[in-house]
């Protein structure tokens, strides 16, 4: 399920990584020369000892919290505890979360511009569905989908960065409402839609003849 995937992902994110085996660390320290047979053995069978670094642990804590937030575990907290025995440190991460938020409703732009109308005409294939869990990847995919549609309809200057979302979690019961908004361009209140002009075909022109 999703929780198992989240646990697997957090385990992968967690830093620092423990050494795969004490034997490989012993080999790395025993064969110190970097050239010849000693260097070959050190490179193929050895592994440098992982040293405890609290700044790495703190950074890992932030990355894990950001990951949880992107998956809909809003306001989740990561705390860690370090146990040191026999010059070896063990880091335990603890996750506190109310749970994963699901989408209650999605609100698209209600403006009457050509771009707003175009977006509202293309909602059937949306990546955002009521009842699905919040996931920032789905939001990014929806931004890209709508951008492709806009560019195909003449909004050539439009990019995904003009779309932005905000989530309202005040609905309670682990539900969130999503609001999609469009940022206007710098020097124009609305995004410009370009239309194809006249197309001229010259039947006597040859691409291979520099004289035409």
Image: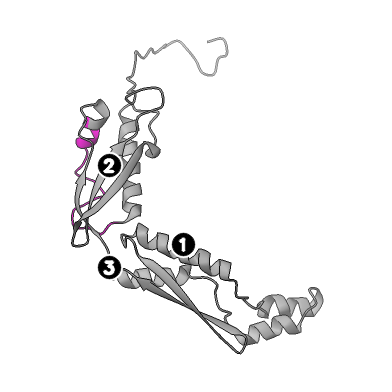
Instruction: Please tell me the numbered disc located at residue 63.
Output: 1
Q: Which of 157 and 40 is in front in this view?
A: 157
First in sequence: mark 1 or mark 2? 1
| Residue at (57, 66) in percent of width and height | 55
In this rendering, is residue 5 above or below 188? below
Residue 49 sits in quarter = bottom right
Per the model, the C-alpha gap separating discs 3 and 2 is: 25 Å
> Left or right of 78: which side holds 59?
right
Q: Within 10 Å of the Cα at label 2, are there few (<14), some (14-19), or many (20+) other Cα atoms?
A: some
Residue projecting furthest to the bottom = 86
Q: What stretch is highlighted in magenta?
A: 117-134
Q: Which residue bears the numbered disc 3?
A: 98
First in sequence: mark 3 or mark 2? 3
Q: Within 10 Å of the Cα at label 3, are there few (<14), some (14-19), or many (20+) other Cα atoms?
A: few
In this rendering, is residue 175 above or below 183? below
Main SS class of the magenta portion in the image: loop
Q: Where is residue 133 in the image (x, y as percent from the top left)?
A: 25, 59
């Amino acid at each position: 399920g999703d929780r198992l995937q989240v646990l697997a992902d957090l385990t992968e994110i967690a830093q620092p990584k423990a050494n795969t085996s004490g034997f490989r660390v012993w080999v790395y320290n025993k064969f110190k020369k970097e050239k010849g047979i000693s260097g070959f053995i050190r490179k193929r069978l050895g592994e440098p000892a992982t040293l405890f670094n609290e700044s790495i642990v703190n950074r890992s804590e932030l990355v894990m919290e950001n990951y949880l937030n992107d998956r809909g575990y809003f306001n989740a907290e990561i705390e860690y505890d370090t146990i040191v025995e026999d010059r070896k440190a063990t880091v335990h991460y603890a996750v506190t979360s109310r749970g994963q938020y699901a989408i209650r409703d999605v609100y698209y732009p209600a403006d009457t511009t050509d771009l707003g109308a175009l977006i509202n005409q293309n909602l059937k294939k949306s990546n955002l569905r009521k009842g699905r869990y919040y996931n920032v990847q789905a939001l990014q995919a929806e931004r890209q989908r709508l951008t492709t549609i806009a560019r195909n309809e003449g909004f050539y200057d439009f990019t995904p960065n003009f779309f932005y979302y905000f989530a309202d979690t005040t609905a309670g019961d682990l539900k969130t409402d999503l609001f999609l908004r469009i940022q206007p361009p710098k020097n124009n209140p609305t995004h410009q839609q370009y239309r194809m002009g006249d197309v001229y075909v010259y039947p006597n022109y040859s691409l291979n003849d520099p004289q035409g």
